[in-house]
Image (cartoon, grey):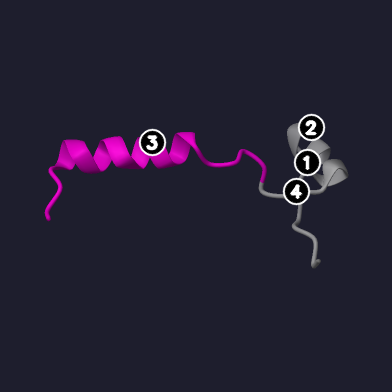
């Protein structure tokens, strides 16, 4: 099955829209990211 450029674009937008905003899951790191600070992921 081959997708047209429009179909591929629609799938890409849908995936991006359903993605988590946060690059981290810990509350304090997420709040830092919202403030515009660098939020490095934890090791655990």
Asked if marks 3 and 4 touch (Cβ < 8 Å), the reply is: no
Q: Which residue is mark 4?
A: 25
Which residue is painted at 78% across and 41% down in the image? Answer: 30
Label 4 neighbour load within 10 Å: few <14, some 14-19, many 20+: few
Occupied quadrant, residue 42: bottom right
Which element is circle 3 on? helix
Residue 32 point in image, percent of width and height:
82, 39
How far, Cα to Cα, is label 2 from label 1? 9 Å
Occupied quadrant, residue 21: top right
Q: Which residue is mark 1?
A: 30
Q: Is 17 inside the magenta-drawn segment?
A: yes
The quadrant of the image that shows the N terminus is: bottom left
Label 3 neighbour load within 10 Å: few <14, some 14-19, many 20+: few
The numbered mark, 3 or 4, whose residue comes first in the sequence reads 3
The numbered mark, 4 or 2, whose residue comes first in the sequence reads 4
The numbered mark, 1 or 3, whose residue comes first in the sequence reads 3
The magenta-colored residue range is 1-22
Left or right, 2 with reference to 10: left
How far, Cα to Cα, is label 4 from label 1? 6 Å
| Comparing labels 4 and 1, the label whose residue is closer to the camera | 4
């Amino acid at each position: 099955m081959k997708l047209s450029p429009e179909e591929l674009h629609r799938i890409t937008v849908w995936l991006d829209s359903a993605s988590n905003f946060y690059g981290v899951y810990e509350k304090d790191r997420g709040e830092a990211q919202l403030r515009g600070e660098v939020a490095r992921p934890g090791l655990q």
